[in-house]
Amino acid sequence: MKLFSGFASGKISVTPVPNQFFSELLPAIDDLAELKLTLHFLWQIANAHAREQFIRADELAADQTLMQSFTAPDSLARALERAVARGTLLQSNDAYFLNNAAGRKAFERAQSAAEKSAPALKRERAPTPARPNIFSLYEQNIGMLTPMLAEELKDAEKEYRAEWIADAFKIAVENNKRSWAYVRKILQRWQTEGRGDASKKGKPWYDEYRKFVNR
């Protein structure tokens, strides 16, 4: 144990500690790491961070004075979690604020700024709807399935791409040729000769097959 030499004589810097710390927090805190963090936070906020009113997690992790006081690698994370749960500190993302009048105002400003930027940060592309399988396409566009036809459709689903099958049914509906034979004819043509170029002569790709399937 290193012997403490005593507080210096003369005029020294002091850190104000609210009386509530001694009357409410100190009796309730039962974790040494949380106690050390709380006192360190009071000291830092009262000095270097007076204007900002918050300290970031990475700044705390880089603070050698604080980190040397801990005995376990996870002490800081545990202490922060306990201090936030107790209400001593307020957390906004990776920033921590002391729960006093100035800290609460700064915390509210940080929360307001985060809420304004959240839609842009969290905007995600809507998931692509799942394509209906070949049996659903048949029943929706042609009619009831028979056991024999179901086997043929099952084989076709393995042989042709899902998007080809969906588009072939679309062509059948648009041309009012609602039959599996018509759909199969389109798929076989695409399989042997290629699907065609959607931009060719500025026409939709399915127009190129109308001459073939209608002959």
Image (cartoon, helix red, strand yellow):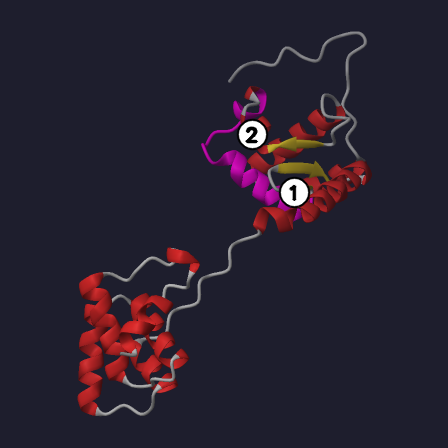
Q: Quadrant of residue 82?
A: top right
Q: Residue furthest top?
A: 10
Q: Is residue 74 magenta?
A: yes
Above or below residue 133? Residue 82 is: above
Kind of residue at disc 1: Ser
Kind of residue at disc 2: Asp
Mark 2, other Cα within 10 Å: few <14 / some 14–19 / many ≥20: few
Specify the principal SS of the magenta part. helix
Disc 1 target residue = 92
Residue 131: give x, y in percent of width and height: 37, 70
Residue 8: give x, y in percent of width and height: 72, 9
Q: Which mark is residue 56?
A: none
Q: Which residue is rendered at x = 50% and y = 35% of the image?
A: 75
Q: Which residues make up the magenta segment?
A: 65-87
Residue 12: give x, y in percent of width and height: 78, 12
Q: In what quadrant of the picture does the C terminus appear?
A: bottom left
Q: Which residue is rendered at x = 77% and y = 19% of the image?
A: 14
Q: Which residue is rendered at x = 37% and y = 59% of the image?
A: 198
Q: Secondary structure at mark 2?
A: helix
From the viewer's side, name the closer residue of 45 and 16.
45
Disc 2 target residue = 58
Q: Quadrant of residue 95?
A: top right
Above or below residue 134? Residue 42 is: above
Q: Which residue is rendered at x = 23% and y = 92% of the image?
A: 146
Of pointers 1 and 2, the one earlier in the residue sequence:
2
